[in-house]
Amino acid sequence: MLYEKCNKSAIYKLAVNNRIIYMSASCTNYMNKQRCVVIVETNKFIELWQNEPNISDRNLNFGNKEGWKRDKKFVLAEDGFSYGKSNPVPLAIIECYINNNNNLPYITIDDGITRTIWLLSNEVKYFPVECQDIAEAQLLLKFAGYKDTKIYTIEELLNCN
């Protein structure tokens, strides 16, 4: 997936239902050399999300297009994605682990559940996410990475100095 550099941000362009939406990852004063972007394949991502051992809302992890669209904050994501390239939506922040009880990989969504279910309900095939730890990004790439993509730190993408 290609991205464009713009004012210390990586802007990702995705085709969604005959329109283009934009998402971004940005340089900050926080861990640019550890934070990573991973392009995930949607079905594998959902499977990892469903493996989450401490699910707080089964309607989200095991949801479907119609259920996700009924989420009370869904309209906020629709609004957020409507601004286009001038105000791209930040990438969701994902954590990826191996469950010690059953050795299954799983993810949790640390920030960006509503953005994520918006993407899922709009049936994207793949999308970028952010991990705040290189080891977690490597796990996520291994179990849900899209085709032959690689992980990149924010520093590698944007030279944040």
Image (cartoon, rainbow, N blue to C red):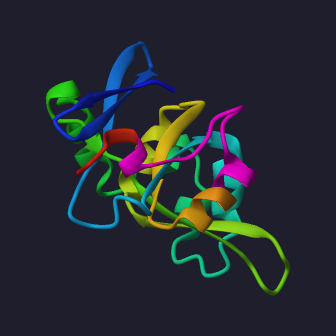
User: Which residue is at a point 21% across and 41% down the rendered structure image?
Assistant: 8
- The picture places residue 62, in percent across and down from the top left corner, at 63, 59
Q: Nearer the viewer, residue 79 or 14?
A: 14
Does the segment drawn in magenta span residue 11? Answer: no
- The picture places residue 49, in percent across and down from the top left corner, at 63, 61
The answer to whether 100 appears left or right of 140 in the picture is right
Residue farthest to the bottom, as pictured: 101
Q: Which residues are magenta?
A: 140-156
Q: Is residue 47 visible?
A: yes
The answer to whether 107 appears left or right of 116 in the picture is right
User: Which residue is at a point 33% across and 37% down the rendered structure image?
Assistant: 23
Q: Is residue 74 above or below residue 119?
A: below
The answer to whether 92 appears left or right of 87 in the picture is right
- The picture places residue 7, in percent across and down from the top left corner, at 16, 36
Q: Is residue 69 visible?
A: no
The answer to whether 118 appears left or right of 149 in the picture is left
User: Which residue is at a point 63% across and 35% down the rendered structure image?
Assistant: 149
Q: Nearer the viewer, residue 67 or 112?
A: 112
